[in-house]
Amino acid sequence: MSDVLVQPLSRLVMEMNESATIKMSQMGRDLKAKGFDVINLSLGEPDFDTPEHIKDAAKKALDDGYTKYTPVPGLPELREAVVRKFKRDNGLDFAVNQIVVSNGAKQTIANLCLAMLNEGDEVILFAPYWVSYFEIVKMAGGVPVEVYAGVEQDFKVTPAQVAAAITDRTKAVIFSSPCNPTGSVYSMAELEAIAEVIAPHEQIVVVSDEIYEYINFTGNHASIGAVPSLKDRTATVNGFAKGYAMTGWRLGYMGAPKYLADACGKIQGQFTSGANAFSQKAAALALDADLTPTWKMRDEFQRRRDIVIELLEKIPGFKVNRPEGAFYSFPDVSYYFGKTDGNMVIKTADDFCEFLLLNAHVATVGGDSFGAPNCFRISYAASEKDIRTAIGRIAEAVKKLR
Ligand code: PMP
Ligand code: GLU
């Protein structure tokens, strides 16, 4: 027998944290399966179905034989539609060979990190950030550097904060606007001011995650890649999951400098061989089609946002901002830290969510894995009835904490 102790699992997976969003939604499902009346406000997934015209296009694509591998970076007609979309909506000029289509925006971000990062390279994350940025950066050997903005600054970082975090090792900056988990939206003026401090550092690539672009209540979406000084150094990421209610289709895309697009194509050529053929065919149609179903979903999210904020503001100790996009609220509940219901002491936002799951049967996600340990996330991609019942139960449950 060999003396060498073989570890069953890799260091990579041992050091990785499970996705908190996915973990909490599974805990909610498990409790429900045991017969509890759980309301699940944990997962960031539109509660609408994919619009009919897109589903019809996928059915036709299957009948037309789109059942084979596509070119690794995507079907030419989808990449061409993406070029048109970036020009039309974002004022971005890309050539087709700068577009890569992947199995969800999540894979797009993973491709980018694997393509860019070497051991020890620093990546600035605007915190609160989406949970997967942190883990993907770590997985690729990078070092996440958090720049934090709390509820009192509408969860938006300032240029001075970004400037203070930049070092010679900074390789990339990643953020989302509209933001998951805060719903905050950066204006063009705010992005220009941030671009001004990044631009002099030529080694930095900006990864701008715009997957919630169409769920924006301000009427104005701004892309940092449209700022001239960062035009050639920004990877603009988007996808179909949120704006078209297509989470299960697994389709995302980016426009990026050609050397990065080539590198991402090379990576996914080894990992996945590219995205699903008939999803891509339908998605190409979606990009050029009328967006009425999308605007209807957005209007409904905005209506629910108003309800959610009105109800949350009434709960003692909850500090909330007014989200301008996405479908999340991110209350600061640090007021409850140190309080107890006699069974458990709330020390962190994760404890607070566990308390809510057990006492209110409402699944939410603690802020620790979003880089915001004072807050927790409520997804309002749920019916008005469920939202009202869930927040009512939360309000009752917190009365037990003293
Ligand atoms: N970025 C953000 C900010 C998200 O919330 C999500 C949610 N899933 C993604 C990327 C990944 O999207 P996709 O489902 O296209 O992989
Ligand atoms: N992005 C969604 C969320 O934040 C879906 C789950 C995930 O991919 O993390 O809940």
Image: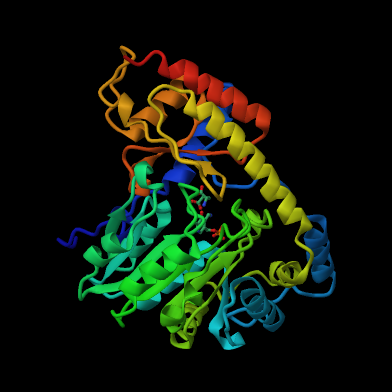
Q: Which one is in front, 325 or 50? A: 325
Q: Quadrant of the C terminus?
A: top left
Residue 294, by quadrant, is: bottom right
How many numbered marks have been drawn onto this rendered protein structure? Answer: 0
State the scheme by which the image is colored. rainbow
Which residue is the extreme one toward the front?
Answer: 189
Q: Residue furthest left?
A: 3
Name the side, left or right, on which 106 lies relative to 250: left
Residue 104 place in picture, x, y as percent: 56, 63
Task: Give coordinates of residue 202: x percent, y percent.
Answer: 31, 83
Tell me the residue at 46%/47% (across/down): 181
The answer to whether residue 322 of the structure is visible from this angle is yes
The residue drawn where x is 19% and y is 58% is 5
Residue 156 vertical placement versus 124 (above, below): above
The image quadrant of residue 115 is: bottom left
- Give the x, y percent position of residue 46: 64, 47
Query: In x, y percent, where is residue 78?
Result: 69, 77
The N terminus: image quadrant: bottom left
From the viewer's side, name the closer residue of 114 and 231. 231
Which of 197 and 144 lies nearest the eye of the viewer?
197
The residue located at (68%, 79%) in the rendering is 84
Q: Can see residue 113? A: no
Q: Is residue 40 left or right of residue 2?
A: right
Above or below 179: residue 266: below
Residue in the image at 69% along x and 77% along y? 81
Q: Is residue 196 above or below residue 106?
A: below
Q: Is residue 352 above or below residue 258?
A: above
- Does residue 37 appear to the left or right of 347 in the view shown? right
